Image (cartoon, helix red, strand yellow):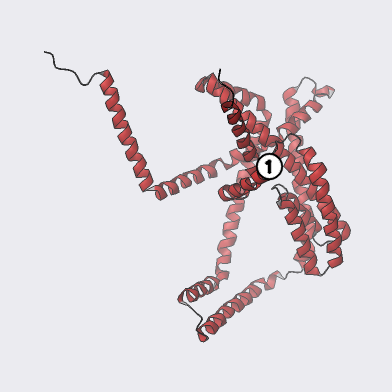
Amino acid sequence: MEKENWLDKKSRKRLLFVFAAVAGSGVIVMLLWHFRMVLDGVFSVFGWVWNVMAGFVAGLVIAYLFVPLLDWQQKMLMKIPILKNKEQTARGVGIAGTYLLIFLVIFGVLTLIVVAVTKQVQTIDFENLPRLIQDLEKQVVGLINELIATLEKYGIMTNEMKEWLSSTRSNLTGSLSSVGDGVFSFANDLKNFFSNALFAVIFSIYFLYDTQGLLSYWSKAFEALLGKRVHGAIAVLLSDADSCFSGYIRGQLADAGFMAVSVSILLSIVGVPYAVVIGIFSGIGNLIPYVGPIVAYGLTIGVCAASGSWKIMLMALVLLVILQTVDGNVVNPRLLSQSIDVHPVLVIVGLLFGSALGGLAGMLLAVPVAAFLKIQFEKLVALRTVPKE
């Protein structure tokens, strides 16, 4: 009788599956055992990738934000007889016009800030600044020493308190020696910023110039690699994401610009100090829901209280309330007419998670991400509630 073969094709597949399951389980156990080390390594890799790709990602974001403006410029330019039927030439001129507009806006904002703070900066005696910092350091260290002595005298001092105060005193002592390192670090960060900005401009110009060609190429490539069904599902997801992000982000940027200009003008009219600076920060804060009004009111109250301008503060607050009402009920809804409806509770929850996960950038993207998740959840509910035939 012929001996039964236990290693037939079906048995080999089962054996291979068992080995793969055991090996996979071992890898998972090892990853969990060294989770902190693996997590540090992943973050290190992502940090390195981000440092390399920061210019590319920034260029992609710039192109995404300004494509509608460029398309409109190209359409208008092609009505000019000399540029008629010259699509790429008109697009190149439009790119130049777009970057000229960006440059003028940035230059104008920086100029306004410099003009607003110049008088205050002129009052600073930079020659005596190191001595002033030294005196301040001595006063703070002396205060800590007196606090330690007083607490010890009355028997209140604990070892933990003494250790913390001593550590604070040690960190303050010789702080001037770290000023040079701080300046060097700032200069290095500034160099990296301008380097990434330069690459962002280069990449964005390329993306803007050949937007349709790039979209067509990668659409065909993903359809070939992933298949029509998967590619179709991804295309629907990207379409939903675009509807959530594009209108919201562009609308918020336009609304932030409107609020920055309006707050600056109104506060300047009533004579609030640093009105332009307050307006700019209010506009930036307006990018995040509920933050813009807090910034506007807080800075206005702080500046006016510091200068004792109570009457000016009262008039400024009344004007800010009127402006915020107009913006919330007229301007913002019109600029965000294509944005989706998100419940305020969902907005707040999104802001909390966004802040915890991504800081300021996470808060900026919290609302469109929450909107995207809401759309997908509603689609899933609709799909599950469709009666089966």
Number of numbered labels in the structure image: 1
- In this rendering, position of residue 266 left or right of residue 292: right
Displayed quadrant of residue 92: top right
Q: Is residue 194 visible?
A: no
Which of 340 and 145 lies nearest the eye of the viewer?
A: 340
Report which quarter residue 82 is drawn in: top right
Q: Which is nearer the eye, 288 or 325?
A: 325
Q: Residue 247's x, y, as percent?
A: 71, 35
Question: From this viewpoint, which residue is outermost toward the top?
Answer: 1
Q: Amino acid at mark 1?
A: His
Q: In the picture shown, does residue 389 fall above or below 71?
A: above
Crowd band around label 1 with a 10 angstrom C-alpha radius: few (<14), some (14–19), many (20+): few
Q: Label 1 belongs to which residue?
A: 343
Which residue appears farthest toward the left when viewing the image? 1
Horizontal and vertical percent position of residue 145: 55, 81
Q: Residue at x 53, y 72 (%)?
A: 168
The x, y position of residue 262, in whole percent, is 83, 50
Q: For the N terminus, which image quadrant?
A: top left
The residue shown at (64%, 30%) is 240
Viewport quadrant of the C terminus: top right
Dot 1: element: loop
- Give the farthest residue toward the bottom: 153
The single residue placed furthest to the right in the displayed view is 269
In the displayed structure, 129 sits above or below 253; it is below
Res. 157 in view: yes
Query: How far across and down, in percent of the image, does residue 241 sit?
Result: 63, 33
Residue that appears at 63% across and 44% down: 366
Q: Nearer the viewer, residue 339 or 92?
A: 339
Question: Residue at coordinates 56% horizontally, 82% vertically from top-left?
Answer: 146
